[in-house]
Image (cartoon, rainbow, N blue to C red):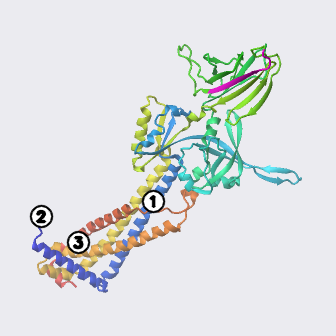
Amino acid sequence: MFVTFRQIIDLNLAFNIAKRLIKDKDKGQGKISGPVIKISILSIILGMIVMIIAISVVTGFQHEIRNKVIGFGSHIQINAFSDGQPINIRNAPFYPSIQDHELIEHIQMYAIKPGIIQNYGDTLKTEDGKVKIDRDVEGIMCKGIGPDFDWDFIESKLVAGEIVDVSTKEVNKDLVLSQYVANLLKLSVGDKIDLYFLKGETPLPKSFKVKGIYNTGFEEYDKELVYLDIRHIQKLNNWGSSATLSIKDTCKNGRLFLEAYCYGGIYEQNYRFNLGRGYDITTSRDPHRYDFPLFIKNDTTITLTAAEFKLRAHGSMEGPEPYFLPDTAVLSIDVEYLNDSIDYCLCENNNVDVIKSEVSDGGYTKKYFLPNAILTTTLSTSGGTYEYYVGGFELSTSDWEHLESAKELVEDETNAIGNSTYNVQSIMDVRGDIFGWLDMLDMNVIIILALTIFVAVINMSSALLVLILERTNMIGILKAMGSSNWTIRKVFLYNAAYLIGQGMIWGNIIGIGLCLLQQEFQLVSLPTETYYISSVPVNLNIWHILLLNAGTIVLCTLAMIIPSYFITRISPVKAIKFN
C-alpha cells in the first residue's frame, strides 16, 4: 500500500499542531485544561507505580514461597504405593540415570522418620537444696539424606555451623536443625542432644551433635524438619538384613556349635539361614538365632546367608521369598593343634575359653581354647543390606515451566519397569494447598491491573474531552480550511499519547526505583508466621515490565479513540463562534 502526498501532508499537519499544543501547555496556557492534564498525568504515574509494584511483589512472593517449598521437597517425588514401605534401589533402574535427561536436573534419595528431640537441659537447684536437670523436648520429623543430597537450598539458609558430611564410611552422628527448634530447646552449634525413635513399641534413644542451624522463615517446615544421615533411619526401620556368625562359647556332647544371627525385616518371625545346604528355618525360641553343629578338622571358611522370608501362602507350590535382600557373613577358622597325635578338635562339656580382639578391617577375631587346639576365627560382614533401601526419591527439574512434562517422563520411566510399585507426585500434588493459594494471587494482580488501567483511561478520556472543548475554535477553523475529521482527531490523539508517555516514563522510574530499594534494603518487613518470609519480596522481570508498558500504551491509546469521535459532531460555523 502506497502512502499518498495528501496523507503525508495530513500527517505532518496533525503532528505539528499537536507539538504546538504541547508547547502551549508547557508554557502554562490553557487555564481549564492545565489542572486537568496534570491530574491525568499524575494518575498515569501513580497507576504505573501501583502496577509495577503489584506485579513485582506478587511474582516475587510466588517465586520465594515456591522456591522454599521446592527446597524442602523438590519438584517431583517417587514413593512406594504401599504407605511406609521402602524402595529397593536395585529395583529402580531409573536411579540415578534419569538425571541424564534434559528435563531432570537432579535425583536424590531420602527417608523420613518421626522422633522426639531432647536437650541436655539446665541444672537447677530446688528449694530443699536438691539438684535436678530441667530437659526440654520437642516432636520433630527427621529427614535422612545420602551423599547425593543437594544442600544448596539449606546451605544458603544456614545461620550458624555447617552442613553434615554423609559421604564417609562411618555413619555420621551430626545433624542440622532449624533456628526455631534451636531457640525452643536453647541449642547452639556443637551441643549434644538425644533423639528418641519408636522401634516397635519401645523408644530407642540415639545421641547426636548439632552441626548446623538453618532458618528459612517457612515456619511450617522449620519447626519440625531435621536433617541427618539416612543410614540411621534405614537401620531404625529394619530395612534390609544384617547377618553375623560365630562359634558358641559352650559345647554340647563334645561338639562345637555355630551361632548365626539375622536382624532386620518387617515381621521378625520367619528368619531363614543358609550355611551352604539350602535355607533352614530356626527352631530356637529366638527367631533371630540359628544353631548349627560343627565338626572341625582343618582350616575352613563358612559362609552364611540369611534374611527374613515371607510365609508361603496356603496351597501355594511356590517357595517363599525374602522381604529384603539377604545379607552374607563369612567366618574364617584357623586351627592350631596342641597335640600332633590328634587331628581333629576336641570339645569337653564345659565352657570354652574365648579371647576377643578387634582388628582394623572392620570385622573382628576371636580365639577359642580347646583341650587340644586353638581356634582363631575372623568374621567379615557387609554391615547389612539396609543401604539398598530408601523411603523414596526426590527429583528437581531444569525448568519450573516444564514440571508436568518432567512428571510424565518420570511416570513413563517407572511404568516401564512393569509393575505398580511406584507412586509419582509433583510438588503441586503434594502441597496443593500452598500452590492453590499462590494461584489465587494471580487473580488479585489481574484485578489490580484492570482497576488501575480503568482509572487511568477515565482520567485520560476526561483530559482529552477538556482539551477538545478548550480548542473548539481551533477545530472549527481547521474544518473550515478543509481539514478532515481524522486529521483533527490525530492532533488530539498525538497530544494524549504524549501525556500518557510522560506519565509512564515517570511512573516507571519511580516504580522500578522503589522496587530496587526494597530489593536491596528490605525496607518493608512482614510477620514470618503469617507470610513465611521476613520482608516483602520483589521480582523485577524485564519482560513483565515491557509487557506492562506495551499493554498500557495500547489500551490507553485505543480508549482515546472513542472520545475523539466527539470532534466529528462539531459544526465549523458554531465552533468558530464558540467561546
| Viewer can see residue 267 | no
Q: Dot 1 corresponds to which residue?
A: 58
Q: Nearer the viewer, residue 261 or 438?
A: 261
Question: Amino acid under label 2?
Answer: Met
Residue bearing mark 2:
1
Report the side of 137 relative to 48 (left or right): right
Q: Nearer the viewer, mark 3 or mark 2?
A: 2
Q: Residues within 10 Å of mark 2 (few under 14, many from 20)?
A: few
First in sequence: mark 2 vs mark 1: 2
Give the extent of the magenta segment. 328-340
State the CA–CA distance, disc 1 to disc 3.
36 Å
**Callout in the foreground (2, 1):** 2
Q: Quadrant of residue 199?
A: top right
Q: Quadrant of the C terminus?
A: bottom left
| Observer-nearest of 23 and 5 | 5
Residue 346 is marked as: none
Q: Residue 378, percent across and down?
A: 70, 28
Residue 564 badge? 3
